[in-house]
Image (cartoon, rainbow, N blue to C red):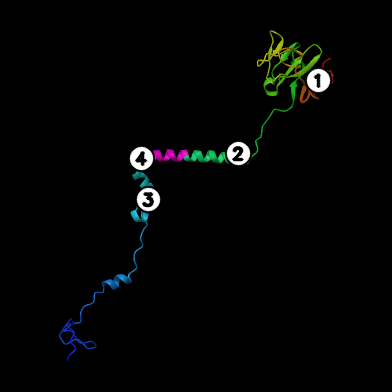
Amino acid sequence: MSDVNPDRDPKAAPAGEAPPAGHAAPAVDAAPARAAAQPSPAVAKPGSAKADGKSPVKKAEEAAPAAGLSRREFFPWLGAAWAAYTASFLAALGAMTRFMFPNVLFEPAATFRAGFPEEFSKGAVDERFKEKYGVWIVRNEQGIYALSTTCTHLGCTPNWLSNESKFKCPCHGSGFYVSGMNFEGPAPRPLERYRVVMAEDGQVLVDKTKKYQQEKGQWEDPESFLRLT
């Protein structure tokens, strides 16, 4: 009994034998093999410039209509936004660097030359040094003294009222005579005097590092009053 495979092609040669003359070997499709042999191309990430070929600026420009901006308005808007960002960055940088350097306050010198004695009129209050140094310079018949412009009540600055011949504090109404003595209002004591001497060049030298208080008897100190002969 012969062993016959019903599914076998009767024209095919038996296994291990060459095909009969006139019959060609069945063709083998090589496309899958070639595809497997070739490396697969790199896959670009979605949204990357390689995937869609668009730069970030191009994308931002295309997104401008969604923000209510036309293409013509987009770049001016982008420039303004960049300027605002730069200003904010510089302000923050300045705030940070400010702590790296000490705060230096330039205050007027505590000692200064006020001028020669003949430049001061007798019976007058010289206010030239009120704003810068906080000093009134007064000359009377005997000499010159320097008064503090700070009210002894709460530290306000009185005004010299020449018509009334007194210093009057605008804050709480304290009044002082031209000598500095208090006589009205809540001020508890007279104005303070500063050291005043003659400098080597003949000018009046005011030294604010030394104060004299009348209630302590310090107005009797020779340097609280510059006597002129």
Query: Can you name the residue that lies furthest to the front here?
Result: 1
Task: Give amino acid for label 4.
Answer: Ala
Task: Give amino acid for label 3.
Answer: Ser
Looking at marks 4 and 2 on the same chain, the residue that comes earlier in the sequence is marked by 4
Task: Give amino acid for label 1.
Answer: Ser
Label 2 packing within 10 angstroms: few (<14), some (14-19), many (20+): few
Task: Tell me, for residue 224, which label it has, or none.
Answer: 1
Horizontally, residue 113 falls left or right of residue 100, namely right
Q: Residue 204 location, x and y as percent?
A: 77, 21
Task: Tell me, for residue 67, which label it has, or none.
Answer: 4
Q: Which residue is mark 2?
A: 98
Looking at marks 3 and 4 on the same chain, the residue that comes earlier in the sequence is marked by 3
Q: Residue 32 location, x and y as percent?
A: 28, 71
The answer to whether 200 is drawn above or below residue 4 in the figure is above
Quote the CA–CA distance across marks 2 and 1. Answer: 43 Å
Range of the magenta residues?
75-84
Looking at marks 2 and 1 on the same chain, the residue that comes earlier in the sequence is marked by 2
Residue 177 visible from this viewpoint? no
Task: Give amino acid for label 2.
Answer: Arg
Q: In the image, what residue occupies the spot 82% across and 20% down?
A: 216
Q: Secondary structure beneath disc 3?
A: loop
